[in-house]
Amino acid sequence: MNDTPQISAIINNYNYGQFLGTAINSALAQRGVSAEVIVVDDGSTDDSEAVMRSYGDRIRPVFQENAGQAQAINTGVSMAKAPLLAFLDADDWWQPGKLAAVVQAFENSPKAGLVYHRLQPVYSDGRFAFSAIPRSLCEGDLAPRLSRSGGLWPFPMTSSLGVRRTVWDLAGDIPETLRISADAWIAGVLPFIAPVVALPEALGRYRIHNNTWYRSKDDAEMLARRMKHWEETVRMTNQFLSQRGRSERIWLKDHFDYRTGQRRLGRPGAPGLVPLIWQGLTHAGEPDPIRRLRNTLFMLRDLRQEHAEDHPVSDSPLI
């Protein structure tokens, strides 16, 4: 008898004891699939351990000293028995048919290395916050797109990602420097190795609450953190490509969000407004021209608002 599960569900947690039960319950409630549930606690100081131990042998609990999200995910993968992997942040949760849909997508596309789906953003009380994300979906060979966009594309987040284990092993573990937003490695590097499949359904819920990475609107400090993260992601991606003898490289000059950040923060080398508008309208990372237009208009709105806040009595033009 083969006891190997079809897919390993890996939950990473740090001090989300108040949410963790919902995440674990959603993984245990999956229908039509053989799955194991691995929960890695990254040195929490709240009641997370008690929550995990309350599930007994229905989950495989792992407790480690605090080392960051990347190492927590890597630890979970090292324990996984299945040929497919699915990842879940402890503050999110899945719909009951999520894992079966991911397994079926991999079976339908035997060359695919990454399968993802939309997530429905919700407030902690369960109310929908806004439309499912990412709005635009990209699939197939994404390497050319990422090479032209600085690695930026409509980004699927951790709780939507499914990976074929053989492709994970080809890429290697997530670098431990990604203590948060470790999905940048999975969604940024794996598309250079194997094709991607996108599922349009919102098969999970993404909890909206202020945390170490999310704000309803980035302030200067948060934007600076994001820019540093993008710089590190580009460095790691190019290092990966170089080590494997690949010719592709990604560049921050092609990364529309990074270039917008340079302008917002007044960084040296920031683009002029007209070149930035053109980059937004032609950016390779967003496949939908209507959304490229909307993103560019939102960028202009934010720049104008920030200009007005910095110069409350000035009528000088933004350009």
Image: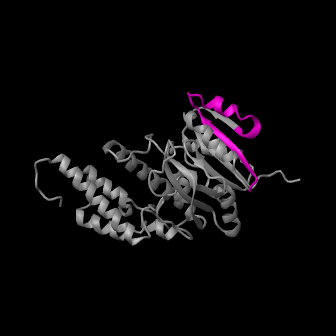
Left/right placement of residue 13 relative to residue 35 reads: left
Establish if 177 lies above or below 6. above
Image quadrant of residue 215?
top left
Q: Nearer the viewer, residue 281 or 177?
A: 281
Q: Is residue 231 left or right of residue 246?
A: left
Assess whether residue 304 is covered by the magenta stretch.
no
Quadrant of image for the C terminus: bottom left
The correct choice, above or below, for 271 with respect to 123 in the image is below
Q: Position of residue 259 (x, y in %)?
A: 32, 58
Res 232 seen here: yes
**With 68 as the anchor, is 21 left or right in this view?**
right
Q: Which residues are magenta?
A: 32-60
Whole-percent x and y of residue 107? Answer: 71, 66
Residue 58 inside the magenta-drawn segment = yes
Most foreground residue, 98 or 257: 98
Residue 74 in the image, given as x and y percentages of width and height: 62, 45
Can residue 243 be seen in this snapshot?
A: no
Farthest residue to the right: give it.
1
Displayed quadrant of residue 108: bottom right
Number of numbered markers:
0
Q: Residue at x 36, y 44 (%)?
A: 222
* Residue drawn 60% across the image and 68% down it: 195
Side (left or right) of 93 relative to 2: left
The way the protein has been coloured in the rendering is one colour
The percent coordinates of residue 236 (x first, y second) are: 49, 53
